[in-house]
Structures are given as C-alpha cells and as structure tokens.
Amino acid sequence: MARITQQSVKNLVTGKPVAKIVWDEELRGFGVRLTEAGTITYVLDYYFGGVKRRYCIGRHPEFTPDTARAKAMALKVDIANGHNPLAERHAWKDEPTLKKLADAWLEDASKRKRESSLRDDRRMLNSIILPKLGDKRLDEIEGKNITLLHESLRPSPYQANRVVALLSSIFNYGIADKWTTENPAKGIQKFDEVKRERWLTVEELQKFREALDKYKDQSAANVLRLLLLTGSRASEALKARWEEIDLERGIWTKPSLHTKQKKIEHIPLSAPAVKLLESMYYEGAHGPLFPGTKRRGKGGKMTGGDMRVSLKRPWIAACRAAGLVREDLIDGKRKNKDGSAKMLKRYRPTVRVHDLRHNFASHLASNGVSLQVVGKLLGHTQAATTMRYAHLQDAPLRDAANQFGRIFEQAPKTKKRSA
C-alpha cells in the first residue's frame, strides 16, 4: 500500500476481520491497524531514547486518513523537538479529576467545618458541580467552564455565587496541596444578591404560637419556641444539652463546638425562655434538651440518635397551621386513566426556620434595642454582620426628619407686596 486512503481503509475488511497493520509508504511509522473485533485505529510508531514506541492517534471513522496523517506529521515534529507524546498522554491520563480533588477537600474540610455547612457543600457538589465538571481533569477546567455553570444558575443568584465560592475554595486547597497551580474560579464576577428580609408580623407570630400549642409533638414544638425566644441557630438548639443551661441565673452557655464562630457564648435567657425550659425540666435532667426518637427499622433494629436532628416535618406542619405556606401542585407517581400523572398538593413554607433568627433580631431592632446588644444576643463577632438590621432602627431618623418638618411648617410666609 503506497499511501493510506479512505478506499484502502475500507478494503481492510474483506470478510471476517483479521488482526493486521498496514503501513503508509510515504510517511514513515504511520499506519492503520485492524483488530479481530473489526476496530480500525490509526497509529504512529517512533523511537524515543532508543526505545521503539507506538502511539494510537485515533479510531476510524472519527479520524479520516487525512486528519490522522496530519496528526502523525505534527507528532513527528514534536518528537524531533524532544517531546515524547506517549509519556505526555500517560501523564495527562494520570491528571486527577475535579471529583478526586473534591473528595480530598471534603475530607480535609470535615475536620474544621460544621456538619450543616458540609451538608450544604455536599448537596451543591452532588447536584450541581460534579454532574457538569466532576469527570474533567483539573488542567481541562478553565474559567469559561465555571462561568458557564455560574450563568446557568442566574435565576438563583445566591446559590450561583455559593457554587463559585465553593469551587474557589476547592481549587485553593488544590493549589496548597500541590494538586494544581491554577484557580479557574478566581475573578469570576458574582451576581448581585438581594438579602432576604422576612420576619413574622405580630399577627403571624400569634398564629404561629397557636399552631405550636396544637402540634402533637411538643418536644419539636419546644425547639421552635426556643428558637423564637433566643434567636439561636437551629443547629445550636438541636445540640443543646442540659449541662449548658443555668436556670437559676437564666444563662445558656453555648460551647464553642456548637457555635458558628467556634467561640463560647453566654446567652442571657428571657423570662419566657426560662419558663419554657423549666416546663421541660425533670429531676436530674442531663443530656440533650431535645432527644431523638428511637424507631424500629428493617430487621427490627432500633435506629435514631441521642438527639433530634431535623425540624423539617414539624416546621411544615406549624407553618401550614399558621397559614404561612403556599400550595404547589407536582406530578405524582400514580396515573390517571388517560395516562397523565395525578397531581399532588404540596405545602411550601413561605418562611424558613432560619427566619426565626431574623425575626428575633428585627423585632428587637425596630423596638429601639441597639445593634450592639442585638449582635451580642445573636453571637455576632463582627459589627458589620448586625448592620443588616440598621434600617429598622429608623425612630431617631424619623424624629429628626419630623423636627425639620415642624421647622418648615412654622416658617413665616413672605407677605406679598402691594402694587
């Protein structure tokens, strides 16, 4: 065969495939290989360091004889310049993927991050990041890949920005641990975020309290009552233990292990909060304030931890009873006679559990409590964190504006001159 052409490749298989290689007589080392399975592959044999090597250029018909020849010629130029394409291909194959780096990052992060934060990170990785980029090798991922992912999440700007921040943290870890040298998530412009401001009106608060009073699981209702009365994070309340509570002094000492800032917090409890805890107290009380429920699982084995871990069901039930939900229709598994899916009604709370924390702070700020005090009660270490509630403290500003209003109204009018 003088030259490998489209026709000569077709002539390779005349019956049952037989393993063989046909070499091109014009370009030394360039050939086409046929396997017994009928696979046709273009190859290049070359010498590097005195050792004969074979590089697979690609399969037919993805590669044509002409494109394979052009690739072979480019490879021969690289080889002449001292590059070993086979070694570089092996190095590329050994290049770790984003998934491997993310797994290593998660293992490291688990030593220093809260479980709730890790849970959010895993959710973003498994549902958003890894399905798109997980199988890509690190040197394949460029800023444009992350920009496209970020742009696809534009309808949810908060989540989109958290995804970029998470990727940036993962690549920074990769740089520090010698996985890679670049952070393609760096410099990507974040979307503008509108801070969520939702708290319960006095009327909504009363309806929510009535809903809690009627809820069948009063232990779960007490968690929500404690969140309402203290502005604590849900994780802090769920992990609270009787050893942290001083009912006599009315103090809740949150250990650093349970707080976001990893610092011990001494939180004064209001009279209603103390009254709530006293109603829960029993002689010799110890361990979790809100113990988990043991359930019998498969095989009769009892499951469940020593403390409650979720407020999802009681939260939905309480919000529904208080009228703080919207109704959504979703496709069910069962079918109608015409084959269409039966629609199921689902109730989506219009407030989040975390909004109880904003509720606590917002009502205090709007009733004249200083932001410094609000920040102390919430366990904020940075004054800027509490400043989001500054606009609620408008009483002094309104008084000042009204003062000028009175000056304006009392200013004497100029008398008109007679003609």
Image (tube, rainbow, N blue to C red):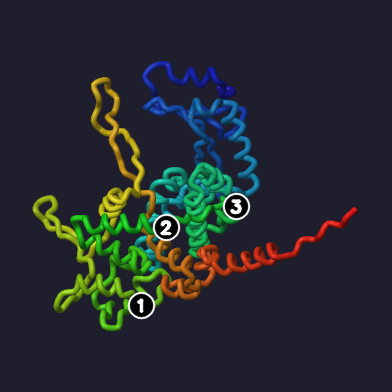
- Number of residues whose C-alpha sits closer than 10 Å to that of mark 2, classed few (under 14), some (14–19) or many (20 or more): many
**What residue lies at 58% left-to-right and 65% top-to-bottom?**
398
Q: What residue is shown with label 2?
A: 199
Identify the amino acid type marked 1.
Pro
Q: Residue 52: tell me if it is visible.
A: no
CA separation in Å, label 1 and label 2: 22 Å
Q: What residue is shown with label 3?
A: 189
CA separation in Å, label 1 and label 3: 41 Å
- Number of residues whose C-alpha sits closer than 10 Å to that of mark 1, classed few (under 14), some (14–19) or many (20 or more): some
- How far across and how far down the image is residue 220, in percent? 24, 60
| Precedes in sequence: disc 1 or disc 2 | 2
Considering only vertical position in the picture, is 230 above or below 97?
Answer: below
**What residue lies at 25% left-to-right and 60% top-to-bottom?**
221
Q: What residue is shown with label 1?
A: 268
Identify the amino acid type marked 3.
Gln
Q: Quadrant of residue 239?
A: bottom left
Identify the amino acid type marked 2.
Trp
- Number of residues whose C-alpha sits closer than 10 Å to that of mark 3, classed few (under 14), some (14–19) or many (20 or more): few
- Label 2 with label 3: CB-CB less than 8 Å: no
| Precedes in sequence: disc 1 or disc 3 | 3
Q: Residue 38: tell me if it is visible.
A: yes
Q: Nearer the viewer, mark 1 or mark 3?
A: 1
Q: Quadrant of residue 275?
A: bottom left
